Image: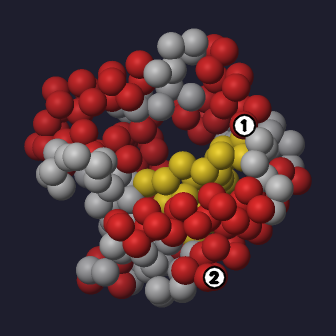
Amino acid sequence: MNDTTATITAAQAEADTRRWLERAVIGLNLCPFAKAVHAKGQVHYAVHLAANDDAGLLDLLMAEAQALVDRPASERDTTLLMAPHTLADFLDFNDFTERAERRLARAGFEGTLQLASFHPRFQFGGTEPDDIGNATNRAPYPTLHLLREESIDRAVEAFPEAEVIFERNIETLEALGPAGWAALDVGAGAAR
């Protein structure tokens, strides 16, 4: 954990994540489905502030999963759960994400919700840490993204070639380059 994340509040984590969503995810069209739910106010933001508290984060994830399915999609279609003080190491976060997926399945959310993950140090297998392609999954903080399966299905119907999104994203980021990504200013503390 660096000094920047040591002082992050819930409001700052949410502001930084919104900035990342607007400038990178929507601005670069990394996810063509994000703009509509953002514009309609259907993205819920939750923040886990406890430091080095994997168990508490998992408990909050389960509570947020239940809260998501308890509300209509028109009110809350997706949830972003940020953990600015927990799981700073990407490999630990990756292991945690696997545990979280198993816990969601055991709780009965399989087939209803999907879990995606983002991390400031995200790294695809077989890539170097500074490979710009890793930025497709880099967020200001360790972030767990709960998505409704039915919303994913509708999005895939509207965009039948969803498998080309990843390839297009890599091309976009390679064209942007590290300096262009840095110029987006979408890291921790950027929205101050």
Q: Where is residue 128 in the image (x, y as percent from the top left)?
A: 15, 51
- Which of disc 1 and disc 2 is earlier in sequence? 2
Mark 1, secondary structure of its residue: helix
Q: Position of residue 24 (x, y in %)?
A: 36, 40
91 or 68: which is nearer to us?
91
Q: Is residue 100 left or right of residue 74?
A: left
Residue depicted at x 45% and y 78%: 86
Q: Can residue 108 be spotted in the picture?
A: yes
Q: In this view, does 50 lie to the left or right of 89?
A: right
Q: Position of residue 105 (x, y in %)?
A: 74, 56
The vertical placement of 89 against 168, above or below, is: below
Residue depicted at x 49% and y 53%: 117
- When asked about the image quadrant of residue 65, the answer is bottom right
Question: In which quadrant of the rendered image does the N terminus lie?
Answer: bottom left
29 or 174: which is nearer to us?
174
Give the labeled residue for mark 2: 56
The vertical placement of 52 against 73, above or below, is: below
Q: Position of residue 150 (x, y in %)?
A: 76, 32
